[in-house]
Amino acid sequence: MSESGPQIPPDSELVERVRRGDTAAFDLLVARHMRRAFSIAYRLLGHREDAEDLAQDAFLAALERIDTFQPGRGFGPWIARIVVNRGLNARKARALRRTEAIPDDVPAPSTLPDRAAEQAELRARCRAALHALPEQQRIITELFELEGFTGAEIAEILEIPAGTVRWQLHEARKALRGALALYTTKPS
Amino acid sequence: MTRHFENDPERDPNLAALLRAAEPDAAAAMNWEHLGARISRHAELPLARRRRERRNRTHGVLALAAAACLAAVIAIQPSASSLKTSDPVLGLAAEQELDRLISGRAEAEALLQAALEGPERTGSRVGS
């Protein structure tokens, strides 16, 4: 009787198999990284369908360029970099077409009216504080605090020095804590 | 790489919770299977192209290797290229004799003799 379950192939092995055209390996890579790719895309675009399209485009672009992937590096930061680059381009293109609006297309969980009002206010304040940050600081903060990337990985994703990442993160946190002092001292 | 990890600040769960609250949780309403299937469907063609290219490359290498082997055999066996049509072995390849050999009408001894003596004297002997 074997003591462990089925072997989970590392990303590097899956990438090698994808290079040979292995569909199952590609599906595994997608399943493993799709959620984070979508999450980053959604934070950049603020719209679910656009985020789905962006995640899909990013994986197909990754497949197209899979031969340039360096096996020693992580696939997660690599696909995140593609999502961020394409997402920023999409934002710029969209900004030219219309003024930015972030629709709440996902229904909020049902809550009591006063609780709902409180949450709406909190959401509005947080959003305002987040969007008041310079774009790079906001992306760094989201990648670090919400997506769980390390400073080194963020440096790789955004193609900037790790020291810059740490400094920008420090500045962003300072600004956010200042803007949300009421909530950070008294968590809801 | 480790140095960067050490230099990372502590995660701030309180701040993270506030940031999560800033946007609706789109992931909760997502149908991941649907998105995964959609991506896989679009990837089918490029993946098939990769498989075909790989197959073609393999076949190309095999054909090249076969050609190289053939060239090597010819190069190290000069006698093979210097065969003349009057040689006994080629003489046997004359259409009539080959026909007799295949049909079994020629006697084995006569054929052997014909091969040894050459094409000039084979016709009547094999036929007899």
Image (spheres, helix red, strand yellow):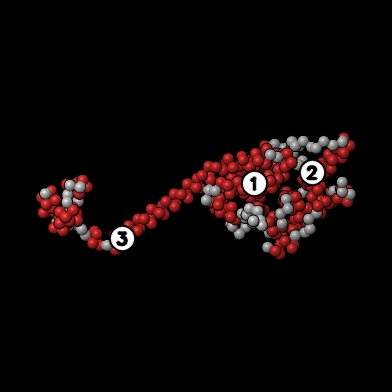
Q: Are marks 1 and 2 on the same chain?
A: no
Task: Check disc 3 and report the residue beneath it.
Answer: B73
Q: Which marked residue is nearer to the observer: mark 1 or mark 2?
A: 1
Q: Are marks 3 and 1 on the same chain?
A: no
| Residue at 75% from the left image edge and 55% from the top image edge | A168
Residue A95 in view, yes or no: no
Question: Which one is nearer the viewer's eye here, A184 or A135?
Answer: A184
At label 1, the amino acid type is Ala
Q: Which marked residue is nearer to the observer: mark 2 or mark 3?
A: 3
| Residue at 67% from the left image edge and 38% from the top image edge | A49
Disc sitting over residue B2 in the figure: none
The image quadrant that residue A60 belongs to is: top right
Provide the chain ID for the residue under circle 2. B
At label 2, the amino acid type is Ala
Residue A63 location (% of width, % of height): 57, 48
Task: Check disc 2 and report the residue beneath it.
Answer: B22
Give the mark nearest the N terminus, 2 or 3: 2
Crowd around label 3: few <14 · some 14–19 · many ≥20 (10 Å): few
Residue B2 location (% of width, % of height): 70, 64
